Amino acid sequence: MDVSEERKPGVLLLGLSKRFDSTNAKQVEEKILGVIAAGDHRLVLDLTALDYISSAGLRVLLVAANRLKSAEGKFALFGLNDHVRQVFDIAGFSSFLSTHASREEAIEHVL
C-alpha cells in the first residue's frame, strides 16, 4: 500500500489505496502517528482508492482517532466504497468516526 500525502492550509490529507490489513497496518500506523507527533492535528484520510480494510486497519484508525482526540485534534474520512462502508457499519466505527461523502466536507469538518 502506498500512503499519499497532501498538505492544505491547516490540514494534512493522507490517501490510502488497495488493501489495509495486517500486512501493512504497522507501516500505516507509524506514518499516521508520526505526523500526529510532528504536530499535524487536523487529519483527513482519503479512502477513495481503498478496496479492503481488515480489523488490523480498523485498529489503526481507532488508535489515530484516540491520539488526535487527546491532542485536541480533528479526524475525518471520506470516499468509503460500499464494501469498506459495510465493514465500518458492522464494526460500529460509523457511529464514532466522522465519515463524509466528499473531500470538501471532510476538510470543512476538521477546520
Image (tube, helix red, strand yellow):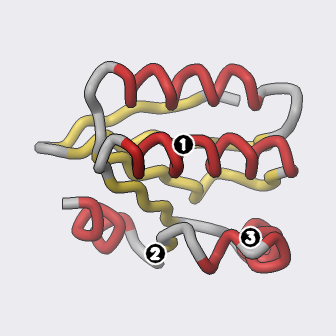
Task: Give coordinates of residue 22: x percent, y percent.
Answer: 87, 32
Q: Which mark is residue 64?
A: 1
Task: State which tag comes first along the sequence, 2 or 1.
Answer: 1
Task: Give coordinates of residue 78: x percent, y percent.
Answer: 49, 65
Task: Give coordinates of residue 20: x percent, y percent.
Answer: 77, 42
Look at discs 2 and 3 and give the one toward the viewer.
3
Marks 2/3 in contact by CB < 8 Å: the verdict is no
Q: Amino acid at mark 2?
A: His
Residue at disc 1, secondary structure: helix
How far is mark 2 from mark 1, CA to CA? 17 Å
Residue drawn where x is 83% and y is 42% of the image:
56
Name the image quarter holding residue 13. Answer: top left
How far is mark 1 from mark 3, CA to CA? 15 Å
Task: State which tag comes first along the sequence, 2 or 3.
Answer: 3
Task: Give coordinates of residue 109: x percent, y percent.
Answer: 28, 69
Task: State which tag comes first along the sequence, 1 or 3.
Answer: 1
In the image, residue 68 sits, relative to residue 38, either above or below, namely below
Q: Which residue is mark 3?
A: 88
Q: Residues within 10 Å of mark 1 (few under 14, many from 20)?
A: some
Q: Residues within 10 Å of mark 2 (few under 14, many from 20)?
A: some
Q: Amino acid at mark 3?
A: Phe
Look at discs 1 and 3 and give the one toward the viewer.
1
Name the image quarter holding residue 17. Answer: top right
Q: Which mark is residue 52?
A: none
Q: Residue furthest front?
A: 70
Residue at disc 2, secondary structure: strand
In the image, residue 6 sits, relative to residue 24, either above or below, namely below
